Amino acid sequence: MQSSFSTPDSFCGELSHLGIISVEGEEAVSYLQGKVTNDMESLTEDQSQLGCHCDFKGKTWNIFHALKTTNGVDLLCHRESIPASLAELKKYGVFSKVEFSDSSNQWHYFGLSGAQSEQAIEAHFGVIPDKHLQVVSTQQGKVIRFDTPHTRYLVLAHDKLAQQLTQELTTSEMAEKYWEAADILSGLANIQAATSEQFVPQMMNLQALQAISFDKGCYMGQEVVARTKYLGKNKRAAFILKSENTTSVLAGDILEAKMGDNWRRSGTVLRSASLEHGTCVLAILPNDTTAEQIFRAKDTPEQLFTLQPLPYNLD
């Protein structure tokens, strides 16, 4: 089963949906170690980590890439997940030497791909990151490499670097949609306002992306996450779907599966991107979903979706 949905090899543009929660102070790492699914104690300045912030029931407030900083940790995530996640982190931080802030507006976020982009990265950072999720930093910004579904780079830039990149590179208004589609084709979930506190991490395949440490100590939601793994309690997973229709669907939208002559509620959209040649979504569906099944968006029933291959093994 081959996917005909793809993104351009070369593009550049700002990503307005991203933001950052900054966690600073001498106890920042140890505090986060007890709140999130990834192993914060193994985080280094040159390698980001994917992780989740859950409630006590294991339902996810936030999915982030953790970046180690001089004063603590930055959590790079979807802006819509920040208010709830930040409030929960602050709630339990009053007795720790740690400070929290929404520092989203201190940065410009660029999605880059292609040879021209790599030349600009090398010019400004001195080197191109050479492995997945590697981070290179300067006083003007950071660059993170992603290797799926093809090599691409996320640049966090302060004002001066942002101005230079805008002048040097040909930006596209479609870049944010291309980046979103690339994340979807990577099988990478995020949390938006409509999907907050609804799904445990394994429903979004985060165990397949090394976003959960099963060896670290206790953290918020750990009992549910561990039980889901070891007792096989999870009955849902994230799947990539595509449609030839370019009508936009939104996070939180309901998907229905065709059952004989009828349609039955089957899943929830996590994220979506509509490009020139169709729409792709990452959606939560029953984990026994098969390639032959047909789905539609409940609110736009003329829009049919078919299953696409995941880039990793869920086993």
Image (spheres, rainbow, N blue to C red):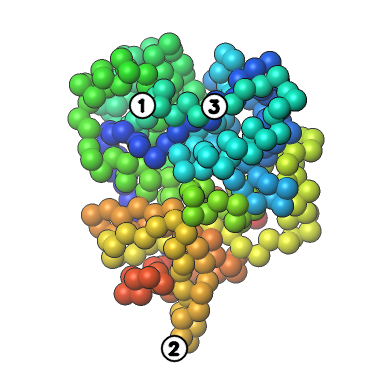
Q: Depth check: 258 or 122 in front?
A: 258
Residue 82 image point, x, y percent: 52, 38
Q: Crowding near pointer 2: few (<14 within 10 Å), some, many (20+)?
A: few
Which of the 4 image quarters holds residue 34? top right
In this figure, which residue is indicated by the disc labeled 1? 108
Q: Which mark is residue 261?
A: 2
* Disc 3 + disc 1, Cβ < 8 Å: no
174 vs 80, nearest the viewer: 80
Secondary structure of residue under mark 1: strand
Q: The N terminus lies in which quarter of the figure?
A: bottom left
| Residue type at numbered disc 1 | His
Left/right placement of residue 120 relative to residue 256 reads left
Q: CA distance from mark 3 to mark 2?
A: 52 Å
Q: Is residue 248 above or below residue 299?
A: above
Amino acid type for the residue under numbered disc 2: Asp
Left or right? Give the position of 164 relative to 144.
Answer: left
User: The C terminus appears in which quarter of the rendering?
Assistant: bottom right
Question: Could you tell me the amino acid type at mark 3?
Answer: Ser
- SS at circle 3: strand
Residue located beneath label 3 in the image: 101
Sequence order check: which comes first, mark 3 or mark 1? 3
Q: Residues within 10 Å of mark 1 (few under 14, many from 20)?
A: many
Establish if 22 lies above or below 219: above
Q: Which mark is residue 199?
A: none
Q: Earlier in the sequence, mark 3 or mark 2?
A: 3
Q: Is residue 313 above or below residue 37?
A: below
What residue appears at the point 45 percent right and 33 percent down from the top-left corner?
Answer: 19
Q: Position of residue 243 (x, y in %)?
A: 34, 64
Image side of residue 292 versus residue 228, left or right: left
Residue 39 visible to the viewer? no
